[in-house]
Image (tube, rainbow, N blue to C red):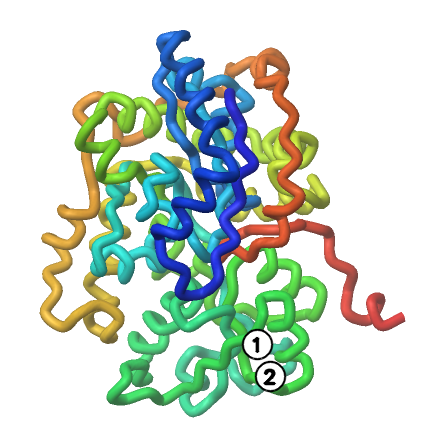
Amino acid sequence: MKKNGILFRVASGLLAAALTLSLTACGGSSSNSDASAAADSGATHLRLIYSPSLCAAPMYIAIENGYFEDEGLDIEQVTVDAAHVSEAIGANQVDVGMGLIGKMLQPLENGLPIKFTTGIHTGCTKLLVPGDSDIKSIADLKGKKIGVPGLADAATVVSKRSLSAAGIGVTDQNMEVEFSVYSRNDLAQALQNGAVDAIALGDPAASIAEEQYGLTALIDTATDPEYKDEYCCAAFATSKLAEENPKAAAAFTRAVQKASQWVQENPDETAKIITEKEYVSGDADFCAQILKTYNYKPSVQGGYDALKQNAEELTQIGVLKEGTDATKFADNAYIFFDDVPDAPESDASTDTATKSTNASSVSFQPAAAAEAEDDCCSGKVVRPAKAADAKA
């Protein structure tokens, strides 16, 4: 497995052409060399988006357990700042990856050239209030201020969906709450200081804040009936790959499905592997605790259904263009392969010790990427101290 340390650090408004030039200068020869090596071995070379994300555990397990290799794929990890995934795709610097469905719908509407291929997992987003807050339900948020990591963040999208369902206006023409943007790391403090009435964000920051400050979840997509069976994250291939090499896109999907099922059955071992190999940094036990709250049973149909559901609701609340046909939208943004099952069979007998030791020996130190903020499960995952302990 080839692992590339190319890092996208793109200032706002930087043109895709400039991005392409800078990446070529930094690492073009390495990528060409990796591709040539893959061709010589008979494997298909694919460039996989890497951001330090706990949600992306199946991608790392597919590498460490050899599932990509089993499918005849040579994977090069391209480190991409999570805020600039769309630019990386547009600049043709990556081939495959995973992402939050809710956040990617508007870019898809604007021409983002990807095709989702399978749902990966559920859960990972929460809307939180102080434990002693008078706000006891979504309906109580009318007229309140909600802190979010970004106006297009996946947690903001989920919040808008729930607010709208509760009869609270969230459109530009009728906005009955105020969304205030804060750094992801500052949201819990803003809530504690009373600057906002609630905060919406993804794990692990959400779970850390909930435990450390004694917060109450008004929305928890891992357990709420409205969301617990909805896939939040899905694997994708670029449209170019899907059209020019559908066999490789299908092979990538099968490997990710197998790895996702393995994560579902082995959360503790997963957390140990991905922290020891430094795909994410932090406390393995706490990572395992968070992984166990999600459903990593992959599903092709489940991913499609989630995409369609999001398209319907985001059209209703004005995130997508008025009159968007959700079925056509989902059909255009999704691809089904004849040789990809809806979900893999359980394989609890996998020899984890043997598989993990057969992983690539190439050293990978993604320290620079760890500073990037993702929408879901990114960065350093540490077991939080209680707020009272932290003050002491």
Residue at 45% in and 28% down: 31
Mark 1–mark 2 distance (CA, rounded to whole Å): 6 Å
Mark 1 touches mark 2? (CB < 8 Å)? yes
Q: Can the viewer see residue 240 in this picture?
A: yes
Callout count: 2
Q: Which residue is mark 1?
A: 129
Residue at 46% in and 42% down: 23
Image height check: is 326 above or below 243?
below
Instruction: Give left or right: position of 143 versus 301.
Output: right
Which residue is more in the foreground, 194 or 367? 367
Q: Quadrant of residue 47?
A: top left
Q: Secondary structure at mark 2?
A: loop
> Where is residue 353 shown, x and y percent of the image?
63, 15
Residue at 32% in and 70% down: 161
> Where is residue 341 shown, x and y percent of the image?
26, 26
Bin the neighbour count of mark 2 within 10 Å (Cα to Cα): few under 14, some 14-19, many 20 and up.
few
Q: Quadrant of residue 184?
A: bottom right
Q: Which residue is mark 2?
A: 133
The quadrant the C terminus occupies is bottom right
> Where is residue 18 shown, x and y percent of the image?
40, 52
